[in-house]
Image (cartoon, grey):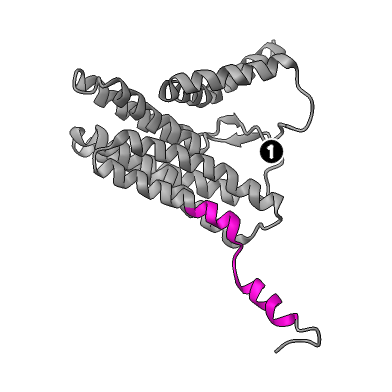
Amino acid sequence: MSDENGDAEPLRARRRGVFLLPNLLTTGVLFSGFFAVVSAINGDFITAAIAVYVAMVLDGLDGRVARLTNTQSEFGAQYDSLSDLVAFGLAPALIAYLWALHELGNLGWVAAFFYATTAALRLARFNSRLAVVTDKRFFQGLPSPASAAFVVGTVWVIEDMDIFALYPPVLMALALGVTVLAGILMVSNLAYFSFKDMDFRHRVPFLAMLAVVGVMMLAALDPPKVLLAGFTLYAFSGPLWSLERWRRHRSRRT
């Protein structure tokens, strides 16, 4: 049934449907995470790591596209969280397990499960506190995409250097340490810069533009090492920032 202008039925249909563009990007996140798992099962760990990085790019785009096009919805928010759990929780855990952790027996799968669980807890905490967060400049705990990049970036670099067969015990210990550390950082109370207050519409110094070009050139020369270095620095920025704040607080008290 429609009104005299014939607009009621299309309006009702729009309300029942979902927004295509942001949810299409979110589906890309889910697909990339699933493809990463399939690639890891087939032993192609470099492709698996790249797929997780692609999921990160798509995850950064879907929310921004939804805000720019005013197509935010509760369905989109829930779909995004479920896709993030696959791409940044289950996929990195399974990649790390199939790559090296399985050699550790029960300890290996427990470490992989620990990472997947902390990713789920991190996402649940973020969603439950989204409405009450006052300072948008910081995340509480390491974001799951950055944590996933830290884990799969390690896999990518070592596979790219082709040194896994030379020192398997050392690399198994490294895989265990990186996986567990990434999980702990996700559920920690450490503050991480969100970069949400960055305004790209204003002028910046000329040297800043040169720095961006320099980083892009380095990334083009050796993507796995540059990406891993960047996300490693970000992962450790939380503990370092907390130590700096503790030092400042202690100096003021004395």
Q: Residue at x 66, y 57 (%)?
A: 72
Q: Which residues are magenta?
A: 7-27
From the viewer's side, name the closer residue of 146 and 204: 204
Say left or right for 254 vs 173.
right
Q: Is residue 74 above or below residue 89?
A: below
Residue at the spot of label 1 = 136
User: Residue 173: in sight, yes or no?
Assistant: yes
Q: Quadrant of the N terminus?
A: bottom right
Q: Residue at x 79, y 25 (%)?
A: 203
Dominant SS of magenta comes to: helix
Crowding at dot 1, Cα within 10 Å, few <14 / some 14-19 / many 20+, comes out as few
In the rendered image, residue 17, in percent from the top left (x then y), is placed at 60, 70
- Please check the rendered image and state whether residue 87 is part of the magenta-colored stretch, yes or no: no
In the rendered image, residue 102, in percent from the top left (x then y), is placed at 21, 37
From the viewer's side, name the closer residue of 221 and 94: 221
Q: Residue at x 52, y 34 (%)?
A: 142
Q: Is residue 13 above or below residue 94?
A: below
Say left or right for 65 vs 103.
right
Q: Quadrant of the C terminus?
A: top right
Mark 1 is on which residue type? Lys
Say left or right for 127 vs 153.
right
Say left or right for 59 vs 163.
right
User: Residue 246: in sight, yes or no?
Assistant: no
**Could you say which quadrant of the image residue 150 lies in?**
top left
Number of marks drawn: 1
Asked which secondary structure carries label 1, the reply is: loop
From the viewer's side, name the closer residue of 186 and 233: 233
- Please check the rendered image and state whether residue 11 is part of the magenta-colored stretch, yes or no: yes
In the rendered image, residue 53, in percent from the top left (x then y), is placed at 45, 37
In the rendered image, residue 155, in percent from the top left (x then y), is placed at 33, 29
From the viewer's side, name the closer residue of 45 and 182: 45
Q: Residue at x 35, y 28 (%)?
A: 156
